[in-house]
């Protein structure tokens, strides 16, 4: 410090006057080092995510929905396609009950001491418990969303990474295909393909398709054929940017084999963005399913989905508006939460992208 | 620029051809011909019918004939009603066009105004209210929004009359068709406005002492609205496919209604006609909006 007492060359120079500062003591230096903990990319992102109130709310709502559909499958004694019975006899008075009411027969049975589980959402026009139908619908809709997004994730990332890694003419041709599929009016093609797949595959029988329902199968085929393109573009773009990064150049310099480069550097660096985009795909799939249910191409009766329930409730909505409200509310809740969750995850994992 | 235009036009034509091919061959993949209905005609009559509609020829030949007819603007006739599909499409499209244009105007006007408001009051209560509303709107399927609007305003409150061909009431169909694109426009406008408001020329405009509203509308808004052009294509596609839902809910005899009708009646030629017609419009509009975007903002690299 004693050597640093240079006189200022110029009066208005911004040269730092070192005599005003002192060196850190050894102890302070050590403290400084222990202050910033070792943190990983994932840990940092999760920390940012936990600080986002909207994202956390969405996360807890989804946990709540998951708990609800799991618990209800044990707690609720009615099955989704079960027509209500009292002592083994079909209960015709239990038609279109409003929430938390009992049918005449059930009231009689209760007077005799029998226990009847309440109809939380009432019953539908075929005397089925509406709560268990809505819960089953939620399960189906969530399953459709999850499975569709897995398909998209799988096909999109394989196609995108082949295209991005191969480069050159292969990349160009593969991207032209993507361009064309991207430009197709998706909803129209979805409906078209659903009609065809629905009529080509047998509706009865014991195959997997028949058990799943031809319409649900066609929904997945449609996702596998059409919806992967934006994922493929995303993955390809990620790979192209990562390949330009300095650490990849450095890895190339020390002759890291290509396979190790992909496994060690490229995939881990784009996996979070791919997963986030897959999360965003879930509400899109739930929406598409409800749209298909609307035009009568959704899951097969008596299997309910939220979209199919909401759609069939439209015809009697003037008398029983709650039948429309319950499934519609569930769709809105799930889609809303997934959208918020996706946004929050994107902000947490990719803070640069946030404006 | 020219090579870009040619490339885009080529791609659009190729896409359109793919749509036609997919539609045609997909419809032919369905088992059972058009004359295998409940009341199947006798083999002789069937033979005559097949010959009349060129169904006895091999598939590729049928496809070429179909393409030729399409070029002449002939979509064939409905196999259920026997009416000319071109006529059905044109009359029903006029209705859809009316509603669609109103919906696009409503979505653009309210979307831009609310988007600018949200950007101007970023992170304050007007922004929060607008953005939460849009998040809720995009979470509810359009047929639910339309049904609830109809239930509340037509059936319960009786503020507006239900749609009928003689007394068309555009209010509810237009609102329910417009809310979804409006929500997207609000989001785009907000992020684009925030982007622009950080630019140097805005600082310059403020530095020379312009009133804040002038800065926002004259300098920021004009530049912020450019990226909205790219949304025009998807928006029109959304309005057209959305009209499928809205027209069915309100029982308006537009193009979307015909499409759903075709699906429920399994009227394959009608489905083919409407699909190709709608797809052509969507592809054309997307092409135009892409070219327009490039023309308006030369900074965009291709």
Image: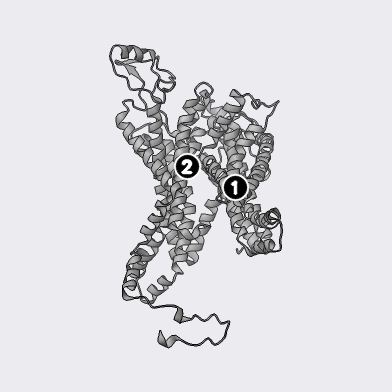
Res A251 → quadrant: bottom left
- As helix, strand or loop, the secondary structure at mark 2 comes to helix
Instruction: For mark 1, name the chain.
Output: B
Which of the two residues, B300 or A102, is positioned nearer the viewer here?
Answer: A102
Q: Which residue is mark 1?
A: B186
Res B201 → quadrant: bottom right
- Image quarter in which the C terminus of chain B is found: bottom right
Instruction: For mark 2, name the chain.
Output: A
Q: Which residue is mark 2?
A: A336
Q: Residue at x 59, y 58 (%)?
A: B195
Res B172 → quadrant: top right
User: Measured from the top left, where is residue B129 in percent x and y?
Assistant: 56, 43
- As helix, strand or loop, the secondary structure at mark 1 comes to helix
Q: Is residue A344 left or right of residue B270?
A: left
Q: Is residue B116 left or right of residue A134?
A: right
Is residue B273 in view? no
User: Measured from the top left, where is residue A215 in percent x and y?
Assistant: 44, 36
Cα separation, mark 1 vs mark 2, equals: 17 Å
Q: Residues within 10 Å of mark 2 (few under 14, many from 20)?
A: many
- Image quarter in which the N terminus of chain B is found: bottom right
């Amino acid at each position: 410090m004693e050597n640093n007492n240079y006189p200022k060359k110029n009066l208005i120079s911004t040269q730092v006057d070192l005599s005003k500062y002192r060196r850190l003591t050894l102890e302070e230096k050590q403290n400084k080092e222990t202050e910033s903990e070792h943190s990983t990319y994932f840990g940092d992102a999760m920390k940012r995510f936990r600080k986002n109130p909207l994202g956390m709310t969405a996360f807890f709502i989804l946990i709540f929905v998951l708990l609800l559909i799991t618990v209800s499958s044990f707690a609720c004694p009615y099955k989704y396609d079960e027509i209500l019975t009292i002592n083994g006899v079909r209960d015709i008075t239990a038609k279109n009950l409003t929430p938390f009411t009992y049918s005449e027969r059930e009231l009689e049975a209760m007077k005799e001491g029998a226990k009847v589980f309440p109809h939380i959402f009432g019953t539908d026009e075929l005397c089925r418990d509406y709560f268990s139908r809505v819960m089953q619908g939620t399960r189906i809709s969530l399953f459709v969303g999850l499975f569709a997004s897995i398909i998209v994730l799988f096909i999109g990332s394989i196609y995108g990474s082949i295209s991005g890694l191969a480069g050159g003419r292969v990349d160009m041709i593969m991207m032209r295909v993507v361009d064309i599929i991207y430009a197709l009016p998706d909803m129209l093609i979805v409906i078209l393909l659903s009609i065809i797949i629905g009529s080509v595959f047998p509706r009865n029988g014991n195959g997997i398709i028949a058990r799943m329902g031809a319409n649900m199968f066609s929904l997945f085929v449609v996702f596998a054929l059409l919806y992967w393109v934006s994922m493929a573009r995303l993955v390809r773009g990620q790979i192209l940017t990562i390949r330009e990064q300095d650490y990849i150049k450095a890895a190339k310099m020390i002759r890291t084999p290509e396979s190790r480069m992909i496994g060690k550097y490229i995939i881990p660096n784009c996996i979070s963005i791919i997963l986030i985009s897959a999360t965003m795909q879930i509400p899109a799939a739930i929406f598409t399913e409800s749209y298909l249910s609307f035009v009568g191409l959704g899951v097969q009766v008596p299997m309910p989905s939220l979209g199919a329930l909401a759609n069939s409730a439209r015809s009697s909505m003037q008398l029983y508006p709650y039948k429309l409200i319950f499934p519609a509310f569930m769709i809105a809740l799930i889609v809303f939460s997934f959208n918020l969750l996706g946004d929050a995850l994107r902000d947490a994992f990719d803070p640069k992208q946030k404006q | 620029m020219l090579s870009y235009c040619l490339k885009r036009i080529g791609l659009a034509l190729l896409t359109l051809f793919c749509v036609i091919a997919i539609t045609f061959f997909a419809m032919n993949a369905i088992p059972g011909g058009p004359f295998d209905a409940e009341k199947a005609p006798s083999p002789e009559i069937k033979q005559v019918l097949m010959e009349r509609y060129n169904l006895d020829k091999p598939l590729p030949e049928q496809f070429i004939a179909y393409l030729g007819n399409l070029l002449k603007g002939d979509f064939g006739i409905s196999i259920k009603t026997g009416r000319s599909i071109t006529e059905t499409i044109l009359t029903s499209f006029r209705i859809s066009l009316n509603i669609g244009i109103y919906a696009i105007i409503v979505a653009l006007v309210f979307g831009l105004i609310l988007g600018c408001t949200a950007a101007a009051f970023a992170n304050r209560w007007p922004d929060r209210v607008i953005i939460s509303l849009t998040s809720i709107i995009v979470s509810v399927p359009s047929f639910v929004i339309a049904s609830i609007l109809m239930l509340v305003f037509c059936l319960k409150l009786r503020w507006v009359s239900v749609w009928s061909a003689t007394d068309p009431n555009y209010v509810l169909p237009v609102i329910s068709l417009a809310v979804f694109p409006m929500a997207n426009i609000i989001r785009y406008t907000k992020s684009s406005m925030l982007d622009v408001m950080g630019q140097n020329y805005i600082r310059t405009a403020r530095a020379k002492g312009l009133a804040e509203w002038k800065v926002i509308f004259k300098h920021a808004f004009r530049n912020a609205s450019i990226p909205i052009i790219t949304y025009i294509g998807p928006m029109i596609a959304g309005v057209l496919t959305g009209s499928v839902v809205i027209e069915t809910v309100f029982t308006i005899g537009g193009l979307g209604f015909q499409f759903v009708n075709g699906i429920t009646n399994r009227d394959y030629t009608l489905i083919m006609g409407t699909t190709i017609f709608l797809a052509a419009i969507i592809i054309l509009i997307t092409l135009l909006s892409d070219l327009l975007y490039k023309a308006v903002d030369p900074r965009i690299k291709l």
